[in-house]
Image (tube, rainbow, N blue to C red):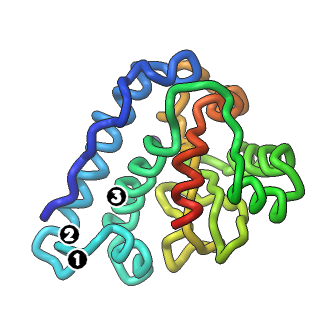
Amino acid sequence: MAFELKKLPYAFDALEPYIDALTMEIHHDKHHAAYTNNLNAAIQGSSLEGKSIEEILTNISSKSIAVRNNGGGFYNHNLFWEVMAPGGDKQPDGDLLKAINNSFGSYQNFKEAFTKAALTRFGSGWAWLVKQGEGLVISSTPNQDNPLMDLAEVKGTPILGVDVWEHAYYLKYQNRRPDYVDAFFNVVNWNEIARRFKG
Ligand code: MN3
């Protein structure tokens, strides 16, 4: 069974004005589609066929660079679409908020640290909120790496990620990554992140 590009869970323009429709369309239909197709090509006929993407990523250090880049790209974008949703500036609550407060002191501190990770990632990559046991940490990774990978500096289960490749924001924000990351917080789907936190 080849990996499949899932449809976006909302319309291309659903995250307007924070993320524009054309960026969403190109990002999903071109970039994410390419990662998916290239991942399938990279594993075709190998022992990785039929394995879950999580299983492949947790042992990525022994795999080819094509599997690493495209497997990461496939997984990371699946997560990215789901941790966003149309809607207002909702904030975490319940057990997830407790864990954020325990790990960072406050939601505001978390937001500042996450933003800093996104803005200081040099070149292309991601910033992550990562579950480690019952605790949370923030990390960033280059390219399409992620915290599931055995070669990641900070390992754990990613429950929120922001794509800071220029393809994620350049059409609307050009060089202004800070404006994009600030806007991103308006479309964060905290219900989905709480679901991933529960595991
Ligand atoms: Mn991307």
In the rendered picture of this protein, how many numbered marks are placed on residues?
3
First of labels 2, 3 by sequence position:
2
- Tell me the quadrant of ligand 1: top left
Residue at point 55%, 19% (across, down) = 172
Disc 3 crowd, CA 10 A, few/some/many (<14, 14-19, 20+): many
Residue at mark 3: 70
Please indicate whether residue 47 sits to the left or right of residue 94 in the image: left
Residue at point 70%, 26% (across, down) = 179
Please indicate whether residue 90 sits to the left or right of residue 47 in the image: right
First of labels 2, 1 by sequence position:
2
Residue at mark 1: 48
* Residue 89 drawn at (x, y percent): 68, 29
Residue at point 83%, 64% (across, down) = 102
Tell whether label 3 touches label 1 (CB within 8 Å). no
Label 3 SS: helix
First of labels 1, 3 by sequence position:
1
Ligand 1 contact, mark 1 (Cβ < 8 Å): no
Q: From this view, report whether residue 82 is shown above or below residue 90.
A: below
Label 2 SS: helix
Tell whether label 1 touches label 2 (CB within 8 Å). yes
Residue 43 marker: 2
Please indicate whether residue 121 sits to the left or right of residue 50 in the image: right
* Residue 76 drawn at (x, y percent): 45, 54
Q: CA distance from mark 1 to mark 3?
A: 13 Å
